[in-house]
Amino acid sequence: MSKIEVDQVDPQSGTTLTLGTSGDTVSIPSGVTLSANLNANNLTSGTIPDARFPATLPAVDGSNLTNVQIAGGYTACDAITVTNTDTFALTAGGSPVSPESANNCIVSLNGVIQAPGTSYTISGSNIVFASALSAGSDVIDFITVLGTALNVGTVSDGTISTAKLANGAVTSDKLASGVGGKVLQVVTATDSTQRTTNSTSYVTASNTLSVNITPSSASSKIFVTVSSALGLPPGADGIATIFRDATNLEENVGSGFTRLFASAGAPMVISVLDSPNTTSAITYQVYIRETSAVANLSINWTNITGTITAFEIGA
């Protein structure tokens, strides 16, 4: 067999270039690139080494379908013994295989590739042929299940990591049912100034101990806790409570959460679990009053630091 080395061939438009005859081998050295378009109809036999192709192949028909990706690999189904029926189970390694659709399969029957949806359909992990096959004359050559094409806008299960979620991105509305009771946010404030009143109606004592919170869900509960100290001269009587905006949250109207009788000073601890039923900003604040205006009632007695904290609890 003769050997011809050619550096460049430039046939005229419409000219057919024939390299060798039947039985000859066409060798393309490493580093040489085929620049002309290949006609798939003429590639009847032989293999062009992978190194002769660029890393990214262009669309075969020029339709710009480049870099099309497939999620998942190809699955070669187990051999099937034909019986006199139209339905056969699909397995791979003995385990059931459920193709997404008939279009995701390549099926060869008696040496002929079958038309999906016409010659056969898919039902779960079964292939159903249009008519019953014959055990004596029909042979299922192979069935290959293709990967599933990526669906733009639909994220595959298990692909989003914790690092991909922004802080605060998951609100109580997105929490699964049955996982309530989690603390969603906390706000707190302190005040170390002794504040005094002799009012018999609830007052804020110059805006002492106040927090603002915006619930992330209307079903959330807000747990509010306060610690401070009340002070009164002997013979006086004072009460402290918590307001949500203009609503007094004291459990027993008239008694308040904390009541101080004729004492020079005493610790004050208040807590309440509130259901505001809103997603608007709300204010929780300590209010105080005397039962009779005989002396001055003080909060943050002797300038002790008072604290108010509000916890949003997911329902």
Image (tube, helix red, strand yellow):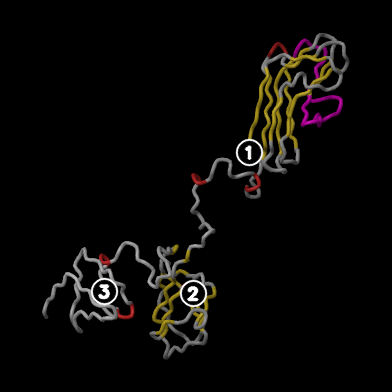
Locate residue 159 relative to residue 225 in the image: left or right: left
Q: Which residue is mark 3?
A: 47
Locate residue 23 relative to residue 137 in the image: left or right: left
Q: Identity of the amino acid at label 3?
A: Thr
Residue 135 sits in which quadrant? bottom left
Q: Is residue 109 above or below residue 281?
A: below
Q: Identity of the amino acid at label 1?
A: Leu
Q: Report the disc number at residue 88.
A: none
Residue shown at 16%/72% (left/top)? 6
Q: Secondary structure at mark 3?
A: loop
Q: In front: mark 1 or mark 2?
A: 2
Q: Locate the C terminus by quadrant.
A: top right
Give coordinates of residue 156: x percent, y percent.
Answer: 51, 58
**Circle 2 residues within 10 Å: few <14, some 14–19, many ≥20:** some
Q: Which residue is mark 1?
A: 184
Residue shown at 66%/22% (left/top)? 190
**Circle 1 residues within 10 Å: few <14, some 14–19, many ≥20:** some
Q: Secondary structure at mark 1?
A: strand
Extreme-top residue of the structure: 234
Residue 264 within the segment the image draws in magenta: yes
Q: Earlier in the sequence, mark 3 or mark 1?
A: 3
Judged by its main secondary structure, the magenta piece is: loop
Q: Report the disc number at residue 103.
A: 2
Give coordinates of residue 15: x percent, y percent.
Answer: 26, 81
* Distance CA(mark 1)–CA(mark 2): 47 Å
Residue 251 sits in which quadrant? top right
Q: Is residue 153 above or below residue 13?
A: above
Q: Secondary structure at mark 2?
A: helix
Q: Which residues are magenta?
A: 241-265
* Distance CA(mark 3)–CA(mark 1): 63 Å
Q: Earlier in the sequence, mark 1 or mark 2?
A: 2
* Distance CA(mark 3)–CA(mark 2): 28 Å
